[in-house]
Image: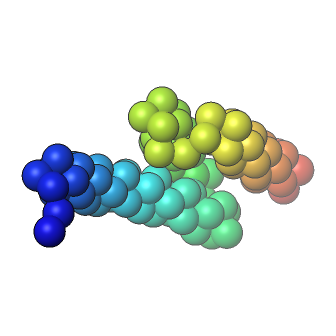
Amino acid sequence: MINRSAEKRERQNSVRRMRNRAAKSTMRTAIKKFDAAVVANDKDTAASALALSLKLLDSTASKGIIHKNTASRKKSRLAARFNKLNEQAAVQA
C-alpha cells in the first residue's frame, strides 16, 4: 500500500515529465526544421528557424529541462552553421 503523499508525488512527477517531454520535443523539432533549411540552402527560412530554435533552447534551459551549458553549446553550433551558410551564399553571389 502506497502512502497518499507518494501517490501525489507520482502524479506530480508524471505531469512534469510529460510537460518536459513536450518542451524537449518542440525544441528538437525546431532544430530539425533549421537543419532542413540549411541543407536546402534556404537562407530566409533558416534565419527564422534559427531565431525560433534559439528562443526554445533558452526557454528549456531556463526551466531546467536541459542544462544551460548544453543549450549554450547547441546555440553555438546552430549559429556556426548559419554563418557558414551565409558565407557560402556570399561566395556564390
Question: Horizontal and vertical percent for residue 34?
Answer: 56, 57
In the image as oriented, which residue stretches furthest toward the front? 1
Q: Is residue 29 visible?
A: yes
Q: Quadrant of residue 63?
A: top left
Residues 49 and 71: in front is: 71
Residue at (75% x, 48% y) in the render: 77
Residue at (44% x, 56% y) in the render: 24
Disc count in the image? 0
Question: Horizontal and vertical percent for residue 44?
Answer: 54, 48
Q: From this view, report whether residue 49 is shown above or below residue 71.
A: below
Q: Is residue 79 visible?
A: no
Residue 71 appears left or right of 26: right
Residue at (48% x, 30% y) in the render: 62
Question: Horizontal and vertical percent for residue 33?
Answer: 50, 62
Question: Horizontal and vertical percent for residue 16?
Answer: 29, 50
Residue at (50% x, 60% y) in the render: 28
If the image is split into quadrants, where does the N terminus sit?
bottom left
In the image as oriented, which residue stretches furthest toward the right? 91
Residue 7 appears left or right of 84: left
Residues 29 and 5: in front is: 5
Residue 55 appears left or right of 9: right
